[in-house]
């Protein structure tokens, strides 16, 4: 028998809400990986995390000495959980330090950034994965199966809506976020349309919503609706917002319908079809996501959520913004 593979060490880069509330607790539940290190510019946070998670001092880095992570054998994977505009720099630096990388979504601000990130990881022979946790969530996996296997016949129409009513900080700063709710939560609708159909949008038409809080949203859109045209006449109608709670992914097919709502939450996902409820387990999505990436590394197989998947979303998001700005239908090449 081969020797048992030890769990891989993950270092979280950026200790904001998502790392604190979701990723660190998920790593306590994970089987194939564990929290091995942190990167933060805040010494108080570093101290708190070190004590709470029993992290050795040698595994704590800041943004100045980040590249020293190269010589740390405790850390196999770097998870970049920084503002969107910083993803490119830290993914590339992590790859150059010889680490496998998970990058939070959206992958980056531009397609050029995505290409540079993919290239850096390939050059270093490291795996790159994007933080698409819903690929490991049973209800969303069932939406993929029902749509792609055509269980209710051909899908004709999809509705995707995701919005939050309380947002602050860097997400309202276009230079750091790249845009407003579309970059942050609307991306889930784009993803949903892609994984239900297994198809790529051919064209988009987008309209910005009215800004009710002009000062708060001076830099980014407050809300946005858009339509995606896909092959075979499939149409997706989507909405995202930073001033309204929205959480739906629904597909209408020839012989029935299927939906999840809430669809994108961290827990308590609920699904149903025209034939009844989806009776599926609730899971820790982030633990499943990080475990799968660790297993992919250990098994020498690809990740189901690679950089190329993130790149395609960025391409679609940019087309949606182009349509919103021009008021015209934009063809996606």
Image (cartoon, rainbow, N blue to C red):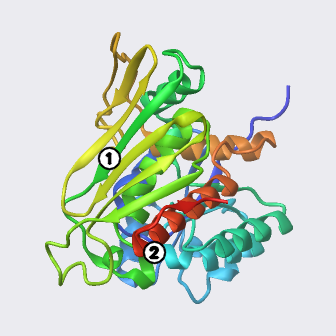
Query: 135 above or below 175?
Result: above
Q: Which residue is the site of mark 1? A: 161
> Which disc is residue 172 wearing?
none
Number of disc labels: 2
The quadrant of the image that shows the N terminus is top right
In the current view of this chain or complex, which residue is farthest to the bottom? Answer: 64
Q: Which residue is the site of mark 2? A: 83
Local crowd size for mark 1, using a 10 Å CA cut-off: few (<14), some (14–19), many (≥20): many
Task: Judge from the rendering whether residue 182 lies leftward or rightward of residue 102; answer left or right.
Answer: left
Image quarter of residue 198: top right
Depth check, front residue: 25 or 262: 262
Task: Judge from the rendering whether residue 72 lies leftward or rightward of residue 192; answer left or right.
Answer: right
SS type, badge 2: loop
Disc 1 vs disc 2: Cβ atoms closer than 8 Å?
Answer: no
SS type, badge 1: strand
Residue 30 seen in render: no
**C-alpha distance separating marks 1 and 2:** 23 Å
Depth check, front residue: 158 or 168: 158
Residue positioned 42% across, 48% down in the render: 189
Q: Position of residue 207 (x, y in %)?
A: 34, 63
Local crowd size for mark 2, using a 10 Å CA cut-off: few (<14), some (14–19), many (≥20): many
Residue positioned 44% across, 58% down in the render: 205
Task: Judge from the rendering whether residue 297 lies leftward or rightward of residue 199; answer left or right.
Answer: right
In the current view of this chain or complex, which residue is farthest to the top? Answer: 275
């Amino acid at each position: 028998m081969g020797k048992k593979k030890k769990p891989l060490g993950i270092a979280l880069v950026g200790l904001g809400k998502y790392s604190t509330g979701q990723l660190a607790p998920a790593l306590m539940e994970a089987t194939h990986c564990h929290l091995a290190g942190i990167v933060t510019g805040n010494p108080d946070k570093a101290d708190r995390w070190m004590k709470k998670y029993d992290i050795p001092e040698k595994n704590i880095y800041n943004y100045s000495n980040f590249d020293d992570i190269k010589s740390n054998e405790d850390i196999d994977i770097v998870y970049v959980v920084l503002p969107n505009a910083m993803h490119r720099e830290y993914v590339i630096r992590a790859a150059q330090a010889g680490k496998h990388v998970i990058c939070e979504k959206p992958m980056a601000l531009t397609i050029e950034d995505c290409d540079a990130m993919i290239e850096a990881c390939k050059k270093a022979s490291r795996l790159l994965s994007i933080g698409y946790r819903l690929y490991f969530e049973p209800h969303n996996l069932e939406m993929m199966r029902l749509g792609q296997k055509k269980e209710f016949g051909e899908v004709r129409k999809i509705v995707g809506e995701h919005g939050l009513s309380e947002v602050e900080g860097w997400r309202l700063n276009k230079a750091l976020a790249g845009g407003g709710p579309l970059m942050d939560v609307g991306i889930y609708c784009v993803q949903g349309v892609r994984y239900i159909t297994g198809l790529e949008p051919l064209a988009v038409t987008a309209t910005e919503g009215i800004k009710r809080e002009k000062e708060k949203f001076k830099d980014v859109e407050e809300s946005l609706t858009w339509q995606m045209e896909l092959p075979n006449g499939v149409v997706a109608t989507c909405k995202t917002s930073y001033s309204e709670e929205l959480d739906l992914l629904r597909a209408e097919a020839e012989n029935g319908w299927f939906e999840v709502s809430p669809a994108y939450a961290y827990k308590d996902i609920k699904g149903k079809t025209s034939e009844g409820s989806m009776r599926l387990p609730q899971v820790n999505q982030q633990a499943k996501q990080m475990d799968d990436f660790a297993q992919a590394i250990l098994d020498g197989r690809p990740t189901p959520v690679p950089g190329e998947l993130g790149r395609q979303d960025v391409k679609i998001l940019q087309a949606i913004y182009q349509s919103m700005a021009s008021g015209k239908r934009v063809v996606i090449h």
